[in-house]
Image (cartoon, grey):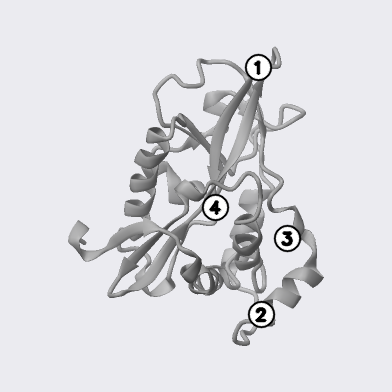
Amino acid sequence: MHSNDYIIRLETENDYCIVENLVREAFWNLSVPGCYEHYFVHILRQHEDFIPALDFVLEADGKIIGSIMYAKAKLIDETGGEKQILSFGPLCIHPDYQRKGYGKALLEYTFEKAVELGYDTIVIFGNPDNYVARGFKSCRKYHVCLSGDVYPCAMLVKELQPGALDGKKWFFHPSNADAPCGDSKAVAEFDKGFPPKEKAWQPSQEAFYIHSHSVIVAP
């Protein structure tokens, strides 16, 4: 894949429905039967933590085949000091275009844009297999945890600027933008606006369960 084979640009309002359908196609039955990520994209755009300047789509073959959105989050150290950081998601590439380098291109491009905006750290929840090659490391290695000194295996950290976390212990406080996604009725109602798809089980759902329920225990 060559950089001339695709275009990365900011999402526009005209893209909203296209992106929501793309996200649905990419996540359907991946983590659970069906998915909620397309609803999350829909509501995230209206949330105060949403960052329009980091809302990008990737075009190839004359159509949108990739999307990434960022939101504000924060870290708080043991003295109460607060640090504004980023989180992203969903990141998606259409199933027909996956494993071809488009996700990498979208990530690397937006990392540069995030630095230009003054951000130096990203914390996400994701499958380590998908992100360690892009410079993400276990939260444990950066002393970043959840309340109660919990270090989830799926919580990954990337310093956009080396030394940004200064070796301190940090507690991660994500955005609450995804809170409405817990309303299964709202998700189902929103999904009615899309072509019917069958909900089903597949092995990736068990892998998701394992990753999302595993924690790192200190030696």
Estimate the spatial distance between the alpha carbons at disc 1 and disc 2, rounded to whole Å: 44 Å
Estimate the spatial distance between the alpha carbons at disc 2 and disc 4, rounded to whole Å: 22 Å
**Mark 3 or mark 1: whose residue is earlier in sequence:** 1
- Kindly identify which residue carries mark 1: 81
**Mark 2 or mark 3: whose residue is earlier in sequence:** 3
Left or right? Give the position of 105 relative to 166: left
**What secondary structure is marked by label 1?**
loop
Instruction: Say which mark, if any, is on residue 199.
Output: 2
Instruction: Say which mark, if any, is on residue 89.
Output: 4
Q: Position of residue 149 (x, y in %)?
A: 72, 27
Query: From the viewer's perspective, is the residue at label 2 or at label 3 nearer?
Result: 3
Q: Amino acid at mark 1?
A: Gly
| Nearer-the-camera pick, 113 or 76 | 113
Q: Position of residue 130 (x, y in %)?
A: 44, 51
**Mark 2 or mark 4: whose residue is earlier in sequence:** 4
- Residue located 46% across and 47% down the image: 53
Q: Position of residue 35 (x, y in %)?
A: 64, 69
- Kindly identify which residue carries mark 3: 181
Query: From the viewer's perspective, is the residue at label 2 or at label 4 nearer?
Result: 4
Q: Amino acid at mark 2?
A: Lys
Q: Quadrant of the C terminus?
A: top right
- Residue located 62% across and 44% down the image: 49
